[in-house]
Amino acid sequence: MVEKPLNGGYFIVTGGTQGLGRGIALHLAEEGAAGLTICGRNKKNGEAAAAEISQTGCACEYVQADLFHEKDCRKVVHQATRRFGRIDGLANAAGLTNRGTIENTTVELWDLLMNVNARAPFILMQETVRHMKANDIHGSIVNIISDCAHGGYPFLVPYSVSKGALATLTKNAAHALRYDRIRVNGICIGWMYTPHEHQVQIEGGQPENWLELVEREKPFKRLLRPKDVAYLTAYLLSDRSEMMTGSLIDFDQKVIGGLD
C-alpha cells in the first residue's frame, strides 16, 4: 500500500461543514487522515459533511459550535481529544466576510468579525498547542487568512483588520513554538468561488452569470476553488513541509504590490 502524506494523523478543520472548510476536510481524508473533527453552527450541514467524509474511510466527529463563543471554541478541541486521543494538526478555515466601511461598520459587527476571525483561531490554537506540548506531538497549524490582511478593500474594513490580526498571530505563534517543533503557517487567499460567495454576489446586485463574466477577465480564466487551497493546506499539515514555519503565503493570481 502506498503511504499517503497524512497517514495516521488526526486533524481539526474549523468551518468543515461547508464551503472551503468542507473542501479541506474532504481532501485531508483523501490524503490519508485517520480521523477528522469538523465544526459548524448548522447541525444538518455538519452531519451531512461528517457522513460524506466517513464514506472515504476516515473517521469524522462533528461538533456543533458557534466560534463567536469562547466555550464553543474550547469544546471543539476537547471533543476532538476525547474522540481520537490526539491532535496532529489544526486548520482554522472558519470565517465571516460581512461587509463594512470605516463609516458604517458598527461596534457589534466589528466585535463579531474580530471574535470569529481572530479570537476564535487564537483560542483553538491555544487549546491545540497545550495538547500537543503535553503529549510531545510535533504538530502543524494552518490558518486560512486573506490577501485583505495586506490592507483590504474599503468595504471590508472589519474583515481586513481581523485577517491582519490573524496574520500577526500566525507569525508570533510560529516564532514561539519553534523549539517545540510545532509549526504555524498561513495562507492569504484571494477571491474564491463557493456557494456562499455566489449568494453574496447575487444579494449585492450582480447578475446570475457573474462568475462567467468575472472569470473571463482573470489571468488564469477562473477564480480560486476550495480544492486549490485544500491541496496547499494538506501539504502544510504534512511532514513534507517540515521545514516551513511562520510563512504567510499569498495565494492568488494577482501579485501583491504589482501595479496594472
Image: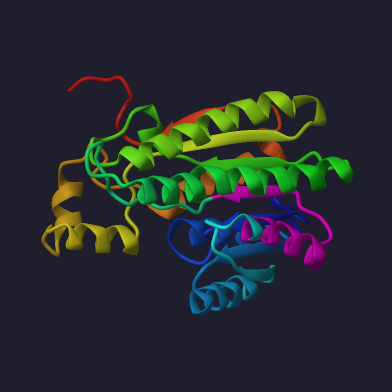
Q: Position of residue 137 (x, y in %)?
A: 83, 43
Q: Nearer the viewer, residue 33 or 131?
A: 131
Residue located at (41% from left, 38% from top): 146
The quarter of the rendered structure image containing the N terminus is bottom right
Q: Is residue 150 magenta?
A: no
Residue at 68 percent of width and 23 percent of height: 175
Stretch in magenta: 72-92
- In the rendered image, the vertical position of residue 15 relative to residue 173, given as above or below: below
In the image, residue 255 lies at what x, y percent? 32, 26
Q: Is residue 77 magenta?
A: yes
Residue 2, horizontal then vertical, whole percent: 73, 54
Residue 111 drawn above or below residue 67:
above
The residue located at (75%, 60%) in the rendering is 78
Q: Position of residue 257 (x, y in %)?
A: 30, 19
Query: Residue visible at 63% across and 69% down?
Result: 63
186 sits left or right of 164 in the view: right
Magenta stretch, overall SS? helix
In the rendered structure, the answer to whether residue 75 lies left or right of residue 180 reads left
